[in-house]
Amino acid sequence: MASSRPSISPSLLYEAMEETLDVKTPGAKLLIGIPKEIAFQENRIALTPDAVGVLVANGNQVTVEHNAGEGSHYTDKEYAEAGAQIVYDRSEIFKCPILVKSAPPVEEDMPLLQLNQTIISPIHHAALKKECIEKMMEKRVTALSFENFKDESGTYPIVRSMSEIAGSAVMLIAGQYLSSFNAGKGVLLGGISGIPPTKVVIIGAGIVGECATRNALALGASVKVFDNNVYRLKQLQNNLGHRVWTSVLEPRILAKQLKTCEVAVGALSNKYGRAPLVVTEEMVAAMRPGSIIIDVAIDRGGCFETSELTSYEEPTFLKHEVIHYCVPNIPSGFARTASQAISNVLMPLFLEISDEGGLEEMIWHRFNLRGGVYLFKGSLTDIYISQKFGLKHTDLNLLIASRR
């Protein structure tokens, strides 16, 4: 029996299939809520009236809680004129699908959260509470943190702006407390002809340290910068455009410089957890009476062993005859500038989210934003938080891909 030969049916068409493209969804109109911040010393607001005006003009709806802009000197009238709806009941604000805050969600906010809500706010790893994260997971919240999302250039735009404000403010604060009117030594920060310049020691060569150095040099002070990262010290030299005295953190050299300085600034921080403690009480005791310590890293525990948390009501205390200024969240003291800086980043972001058809679509198309997402539909996607609290971690990329 002859073997059957393969045959091709003329009715079959062998053509290449069309490629399936990732089609962009049509734009979505956003409903954004801005609650009044009740967190400690928080005066900023995440969107200014000008930014609200742009969002409303593009077809989005913004609801603002009564007096939410008070700390930044923005009135309800300004928000209403920009097209926002003003509400007096806090629970009404929390019914908005998207909440934008200038402080992290606090325990008082938890009962008001809605299912499947989106929160865009800072996160403050050091002050995080497990109960808040669990409650947000339970409510299937999607949460994006200011500190960790990047722009297209790969930098952290809001962190950079807040660090610039803190760094620039440091020298203004130092000058204020060195004057006789604030029980200081009566020394002019900087110096004049014929008088040796004021000595400033800055510990940390990041953005805060760089801005503080720039301002101190502009005032005519003699500046010495310490950091354990040699690359950051090189970068600081390059950004300033001229040589400045720098050193790695060697305790004996640091102690020697602190002994003769008028101003010491602590601007070291770790990405997560406590700031490195590099100045001992013994070093502080050897400093000149009437000199001032400004510990910008107090938000994360501080760089000086003698640092203790203070407030804007009582910003300083005296220890070993050295003035200590340890107010956390320095940008909040310059709330209007800080609010404008945050708003400049968030307003274009919201316009993009609207154009993309929602945050989920935006995260799919914009890889830079993924670093800022720490909760996605109730799943914890930040590995540091999961390790800190022993909670289950899920990879964000897998979560997003599984929903396409």
Image (tube, grey):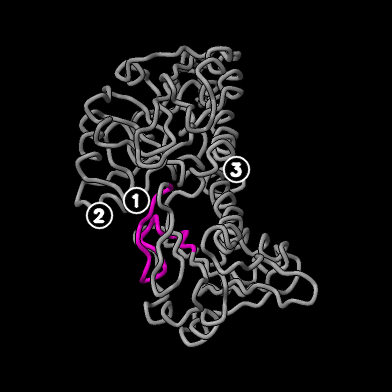
The image shows residue 101, relative to residue 127, as above or below, that is above
Label 3 vs 1, first from the N-terminus: 1
Q: Determine crowd level at label 2: few under 14, some 14-19, many 20+ residues with C-alpha closer than 10 A.
A: few
Nearer the observer, 16 or 181: 181
The amino acid type found where label 2 is placed reads Lys
In three-dimensional space, the C-alpha distance between marks 1 and 2, rounded to whole angstroms, equals 10 Å
Task: Decide if residue 311 is on the left or right side of residue 264.
Answer: left
Question: Which disc, if any, is residue 329?
Answer: none
Of the two numbered discs 1 and 2 in the rendering, the one whose residue sits closer to the viewer: 1
Nearer the observer, 312 or 375: 312
**Image x and y of residue 87, in percent:** 39, 13
**Image x and y of residue 316, in percent:** 43, 58
Q: Magenta segment, which residues?
A: 294-312
The image shows residue 143, relative to residue 383, as above or below, that is above
Nearer the observer, 204 or 5: 204
308 drawn magenta: yes
Query: In this view of the protein, can residue 290 be seen by the observer?
Result: yes
Furthest residue in direction right, as rendered: 193
Label 2 vs 3, first from the N-terminus: 3
- Secondary structure beneath dot 1 equals helix
Of the two numbered discs 3 and 1 in the rendering, the one whose residue sits closer to the viewer: 1
Label 1 vs 2, first from the N-terminus: 1
> Is mark 1 in CB contact (under 8 Å) with mark 2?
yes
Q: Which residue is label 2 attached to?
A: 388
State whether the magenta stretch is mostly helix, strand or loop: loop
Question: Which image quarter is the N terminus in?
Answer: top left
- Secondary structure beneath dot 3 equals loop
Residue at x-position 53% and y-position 58%: 182
Q: Which residue is label 1 attached to?
A: 125
In three-dimensional space, the C-alpha distance between marks 3 and 1, rounded to whole angstroms, equals 24 Å
